[in-house]
Image (cartoon, rainbow, N blue to C red):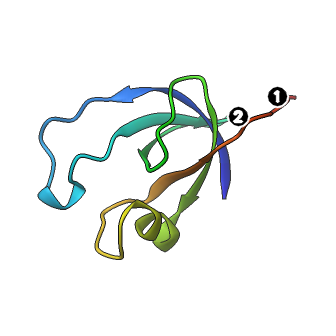
């Protein structure tokens, strides 16, 4: 599990049908590089979130066949950025 901050929405009009209409967001680990995450909880830019990867990301996004390698599974209510 990773803690990331949501930077912005990623607009992708051409997708494979298995992705459905799940929102995609650009997230960044503190001091790390940007990644794209599937939003399973409804967060907004600026939110600190918990993300899961690998098979946990596919399950959280909708099922074993869902093509996700990073999925947001929770919004952090209180986070003191060090």
- Residue 81 versus residue 57 in the image, above or below: above
**Where's the C terminus, which quadrant?**
top right
Residue at (14% x, 35% y) in the render: 13
Q: Which numbered marker is on residue 81?
A: 1
Q: Position of residue 19 (x, y in %)?
A: 23, 55
Q: Position of residue 14 (x, y in %)?
A: 12, 41
Which residue bears the numbered disc 2? 30
Residue at (70% x, 40% y) in the render: 76
- The furthest residue to the bottom: 64
Residue at (49% x, 68% y) in the render: 54
Residue at (85% x, 29% y) in the render: 80
Q: Is residue 64 left or right of residue 74?
A: left
Callout 1 secondary element: loop
Q: Residues within 10 Å of mark 2 (few under 14, many from 20)?
A: few
Q: In which quarter of the view is residue 24 placed?
A: top left
Q: Is residue 22 left or right of residue 79?
A: left
- Residue 23 versus residue 60 in the image, above or below: above
Q: Is residue 55 left or right of residue 20?
A: right
5 or 47, nearer to the observer:
47
Q: In which quarter of the view is residue 39 placed?
A: top left
State if disc 2 and disc 1 touch (CB < 8 Å): yes
Q: Residues within 10 Å of mark 1 (few under 14, many from 20)?
A: few
- Residue 51 versus residue 5 in the image, above or below: below
Q: How many marks?
A: 2
């Amino acid at each position: 599990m990773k803690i990331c901050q949501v930077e912005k929405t990623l607009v992708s009009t051409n997708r494979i049908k298995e992705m459905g209409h799940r929102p995609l967001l650009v997230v960044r680990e503190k001091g790390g590089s940007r990644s794209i995450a599937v939003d399973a909880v409804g967060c907004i830019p600026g939110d600190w979130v918990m993300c899961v990867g690998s098979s946990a990301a596919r399950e959280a996004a909708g099922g074993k066949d869902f093509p996700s390698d990073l999925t947001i599974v929770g919004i952090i209510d209180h986070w003191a950025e060090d």
